[in-house]
Amino acid sequence: MGRQIAIVLYVVPIVAVVVGVDILFFRGHFWERLMANVGIVLIFAAFYLRFVRR
């Protein structure tokens, strides 16, 4: 149960950052928004693999 909570607490900031960046910077720019979202997810994934995963 603790691991599931940790995953949820990790996914919520990813969603918040992606939505925030979309709304603030890339409204109406599909390809730029897509590239930024992929980059954000890759950064969070790298952080997860480096520091969070045991």
Image (cartoon, grey):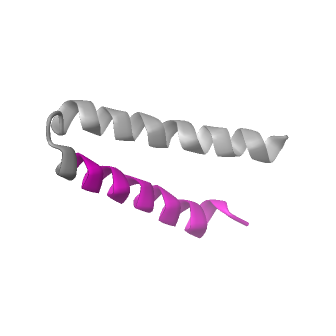
Residue 41 point in image, percent of width and height: 43, 54
Residue 48 point in image, percent of width and height: 57, 60
Residue 23 point in image, percent of width and height: 24, 30
Looking at the image, residue 20 lies above or below residue 51:
above
Residue farthest to the top? Answer: 23
Residue in the image at 43% along x and 61% along y: 42
Residue in the image at 35% along x and 34% along y: 19
Majority secondary structure in the magenta region = helix
Q: Quadrant of residue 10?
A: top right
Looking at the image, residue 41 lies above or below residue 7:
below
The residue nearer to you, when weighing 2 against 28, is: 28
Residue 33 point in image, percent of width and height: 24, 46
Residue range highlighted in magenta: 33-54
Left or right, residue 34 beside residue 46: left
Residue in the image at 62% along x and 38% along y: 9
The quarter of the rendered structure image containing the N terminus is: top right
Left or right, residue 24 beside residue 7: left
Q: Quadrant of residue 24?
A: top left
Residue in the image at 42% along x and 34% along y: 16
Left or right, residue 1 beside residue 7: right
Total labels drawn: 0
The quarter of the rendered structure image containing the C terminus is: bottom right
Q: Is residue 48 magenta?
A: yes
Residue farthest to the right? Answer: 1
Residue farthest to the front? Answer: 30
Q: Is residue 35 magenta?
A: yes
